[in-house]
Image (cartoon, coloured by chain):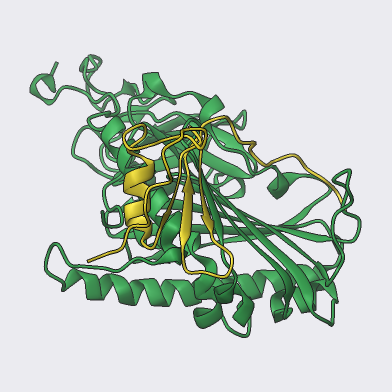
Chain colours: A yellow, B green
Amino acid sequence: MTAVDGRTGRTGSIYTVEWVPGTDLLLGICHCGARRRFEDPIELWDWMLGHPEGHRSPADPAPEPALTRRA
Amino acid sequence: MGFPVKFARNRWYVAAYTSEVTRELLPRTICGEALVFYRTQAGQVVALSDRCVHRRFPLSESHLDGDNVVCGYHGFTYDTSGTCVAVPGQRRIPRTARVPAFPVVEQDSFVWVWIGDAAEADPAGIPRAPWLDHPDWTAVHGREPLDAPYGLLVDNLLDLSHETYLHGGYIGTPEVAETPIKTEVDEERQIVYVSRHMDDAACPPFYANSTGITGRIVRWQDIEYHPPCLYLLHSRVAPVGVLPNADGSDPGGFHVEVVYAITPETENSTHDFWAVARDFAGDDDGVSDFLRESNRTVVLQDVVALNTLAKVLETERDGYQELSINIDTGGLAARRLIAAQIAQGAGAEPARAPSAAATG
């Protein structure tokens, strides 16, 4: 099959959201390396795009913030 | 944040297929701008405002004289830049007698038009869909009118789990809704990616009848959305267990590029351009006919659903609540990018003649 290069490659500033296998949770991964799990995609994007506020890289000794739950 | 209704200005939008623009005058409204398209004798595409500066008669109801448009009401004549070069009965042409001309680019079988400040138009910013006119690929296409805000179509296409329920028997199977997605946003390039990889899925008729695969399949859906207008679905199907080689070559895969151009006509209507390109059975007209009819059927299923949804939403009070779940992650990201684009392009207008000095 013929390859045609039409796809656009990623740059360095990628926000990633993975659906955690076997769960209903979403894992947000900021381009700065900060990671956090959410149950709600709106809360996830609010946190993710709020970079750098509340973002800590995995190398940071502070623990990953607790899972948020909706009221 | 709800789905967008307003348009992002200072953006490129697909206005037509290149094959639609000829020596006949073609009217088309893009982002609320009534435009007229035509080709010069040398083949260049021209886009002008479709309203004569004199009494607002549609230039599309007029005729060409060489490369100039002659208004069918009083004969005001415009060149390809929109400048009036002749008026009836007098030699002096008012200084402000001109209509806006819109930057246009032909690329990948589309005619793109710039909506906004013409001085800001950069063709390098137009996203690509090279499969649509590549000699090694075969494409079919169409355009359907949608009586709904374009944001509803963005929502629809960014979440393909609806295929299972709205398009069962064509492209939907249970695995689409059941399979988790991965979403990525490239802020710098303004792209939303949504990927859904199914390792063992039923083969829907759309792919079974076009590829000849009879059993279960590997089915990959990789969305690449360039807001506001261009949506690409990189689709790969193959028999279960058949994967690309380590070097990236993929002789066992069937590749389909499903392309949508989501172009607002008004705040309540949308041009739904769709195309399906494939890298197999390229000379088989039967496969082309099948994919054209099947995809058009799928598009019309979306059109019926979104028209219904638009009517319902018109009756809802402002600030209605909606609920988003995991499948909406990509659509929510798209809404945010579009909202930023709308804010960025606010106030960008094509150059118009100052009305206060209309008599020159």
Decide if residue B190 is in sight here.
Answer: yes
Total label count?
0
Residue A58 image point, x, y percent = 51, 37
Q: Is residue A13 left or right of residue A2?
A: left
Q: Is residue B311 left or right of residue B11?
A: left
Instruction: Check the image and report above or below for B64 versus B6.
Output: above
Judged from this view, the residue extending furthest toward the left is B356
Q: Nearer the viewer, residue A12 or B174?
A: A12
Instruction: Check the image and report above or below for B18 versus B309.
Output: above
Decide if residue B173 is in sight here.
Answer: no
Q: Nearer the viewer, residue B236 or B60?
A: B236
Q: Residue at x 37, y 24 (%)?
A: B118
Residue A10 image point, x, y percent = 61, 36
Q: Residue at x 40, y 30 (%)?
A: B102
Residue B212 image point, x, y percent = 85, 76
Q: Nearer the viewer, residue B51 or B296?
A: B296
Residue B45 image point, x, y percent = 53, 34
